[in-house]
Image: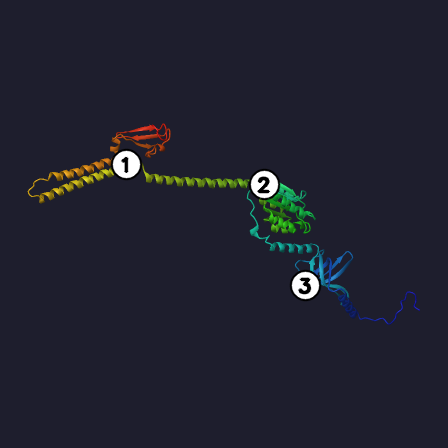
């Protein structure tokens, strides 16, 4: 019989060597658990000179020693640190020299925020393939917006920062606020609805006195979880579809969201977003003054050019009276040449008649008569071309104040001063009636 408290043994108990028992335990763990994944918080992290990493992971009820060899740690895309929540994949083993249970980690990724980051990368890849990040798709901002739309939470500190910046820089520009949650489960849908409402407002602009030319989508800083609404794919597609350019100012300068990448312009902070769309009023006035100066200078150059052109044209035209005088001189010159030619022809004819005549001592009368007749006809032609001869017949030559010849009543207007040149002297006239049947 066995004594109380002493178990009965059916046979002799196996006695293990320590190393053999550790190996047996390792084999049992490998067969029962491996491969294994575990989530926990890093503690006691260190990286040896060899490149191997040693640490433990823990939760509220347990702790497990871990090792990650150099070949695996070289593949990490983040820096592990104490307190970080991670997910490890690897194999359970027993470190025989100390008999310690350990996890040989073959991969490590961030849990919690790490999972969100992977989701972030997946959304980013889809939208990039769809062309939503293409710079050619993005629109320039208006230099002087007629109205500014704001989408943010009524309780956000970003709203105060943006309103202060706008009031300081462009107090004359109207602002339209469409509130929406910027954090939490309902935030993405509310942000999408707010942008849609501004788009509908833009479509119905004919019935409103306020025109919105740019939208500010803003909120303050926070963790990845706090800003997650701005990584929503529905919001990104609504930003891309907005008929109004969108400036996204979410978080701090180091925070980057999907909304930042899709927006027409990304601002490092909400205040910077307001400043990007609100050039100071003095800048606008300076620009206006510079444009006015350039316009005045261009106008003066154009006037000078046209004045020079007018002077050149006037010089080419000259005064009509000068042209008449020139023509009169030309006619007189032709008359003198004709007289000389007739006289020379007569002398030559007389000489021919003297040599050919059969005893005649003087020029036949009919030859002289013909010459005289040709001379009279030439004289008559010259007199008909003389403007003074026309004036002597009772006609007058009318000119306006610029010297332009008046040939029709339609060239005159009531009260216009005219000058009438007569055969002997000139008269200054004033038009009493214009058009047909006018009288002076």
From the viewer's perspective, is the residue at label 2 or at label 3 nearer? 2
Q: Is residue 389 above or below residue 279?
A: above
Q: Quadrant of residue 113?
A: bottom right
Q: Residues within 10 Å of mark 1 (few under 14, many from 20)?
A: few
Circle 3 SS class: helix
Q: Which residue is mark 2?
A: 205
| CA distance separating discs 2 and 1 | 69 Å
Q: Is residue 413 above or below residue 229?
A: above
Circle 1 SS class: helix
Residue 256 horizontal/vertical position (percent): 63, 51
Mark 2 or 1, nearer chain start = 2
Q: Nearer the viewer, residue 308 or 66?
A: 308
Q: Residue 324's mark? A: 1
Q: Nearer the viewer, residue 437 or 426?
A: 437
Q: Quadrant of residue 29?
A: bottom right
Residue 309 horizontal/vertical position (percent): 37, 41
Q: Which residue is mark 3?
A: 72
Quadrant location of the C terminus in the rendered image: top left
Q: Is residue 147 above or below residue 115?
A: above
Q: Please say whether residue 219 is visible from this viewpoint.
A: no
| CA distance separating discs 1 and 3 | 109 Å
Q: Quadrant of residue 110?
A: bottom right
| CA distance separating discs 2 and 3 | 60 Å
């Amino acid at each position: 019989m066995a004594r109380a408290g002493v178990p009965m043994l059916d046979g002799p108990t196996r006695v293990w060597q320590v190393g053999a028992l550790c190996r047996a335990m390792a084999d049992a763990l490998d067969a029962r658990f491996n491969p294994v994944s575990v989530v926990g918080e890093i503690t006691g992290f260190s990286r040896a000179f060899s490149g191997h990493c040693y640490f433990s992971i823990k939760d509220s009820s347990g702790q497990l020693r871990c090792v990650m060899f150099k070949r695996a740690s070289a593949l990490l895309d983040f820096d592990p640190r104490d307190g970080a929540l991670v997910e490890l994949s690897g194999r359970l083993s027993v470190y025989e020299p100390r008999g310690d249970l350990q996890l040989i980690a073959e991969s490590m990724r961030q849990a919690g925020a790490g999972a969100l980051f992977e989701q972030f990368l997946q959304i980013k890849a889809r939208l990039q393939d769809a062309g939503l990040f293409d710079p050619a798709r993005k629109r320039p901002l208006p230099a002087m917006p007629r109205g500014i739309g704001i989408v943010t939470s009524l309780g956000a500190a970003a709203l105060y920062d943006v309103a202060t910046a706008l009031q300081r820089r462009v107090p004359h520009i109207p602002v339209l606020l469409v509130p929406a949650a910027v954090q939490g489960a309902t935030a993405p849908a509310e942000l999408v609805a707010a942008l849609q409402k501004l788009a509908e407002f833009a479509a119905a602009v004919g019935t409103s006195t306020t025109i919105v030319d740019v939208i500010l989508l803003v909120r303050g800083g926070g963790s990845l979880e706090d800003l997650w609404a701005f990584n929503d794919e529905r919001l990104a597609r609504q930003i891309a579809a907005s008929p109004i350019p969108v400036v996204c100012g979410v978080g701090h300068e180091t925070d980057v969201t999907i909304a930042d990448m899709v927006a027409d312009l990304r601002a490092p902070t909400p205040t910077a977003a307001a400043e990007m769309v609100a050039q100071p009023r003095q800048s606008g006035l300076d620009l206006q003054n510079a444009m006015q100066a350039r316009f005045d200078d261009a106008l003066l150059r154009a006037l000078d050019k046209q004045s020079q052109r007018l002077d050149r044209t006037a010089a080419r035209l000259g005064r009509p009276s000068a042209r008449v005088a020139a023509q009169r001189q030309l006619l007189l010159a032709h008359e003198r040449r004709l007289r000389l030619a007739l006289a020379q022809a007569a002398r030559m004819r007389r000489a021919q008649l003297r040599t050919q005549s059969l005893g005649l001592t003087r020029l036949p009368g009919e030859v002289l008569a013909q010459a005289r007749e040709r001379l009279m006809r030439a004289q008559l032609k010259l007199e008909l071309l003389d403007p003074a001869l026309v004036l002597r017949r009772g006609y007058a030559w009318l000119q306006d104040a610029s010297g332009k010849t008046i040939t029709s009543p339609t060239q005159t207007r009531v009260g216009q001063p005219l000058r009438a040149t007569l055969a002997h002297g000139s008269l200054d006239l004033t038009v009493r009636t214009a058009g047909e049947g006018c009288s002076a």
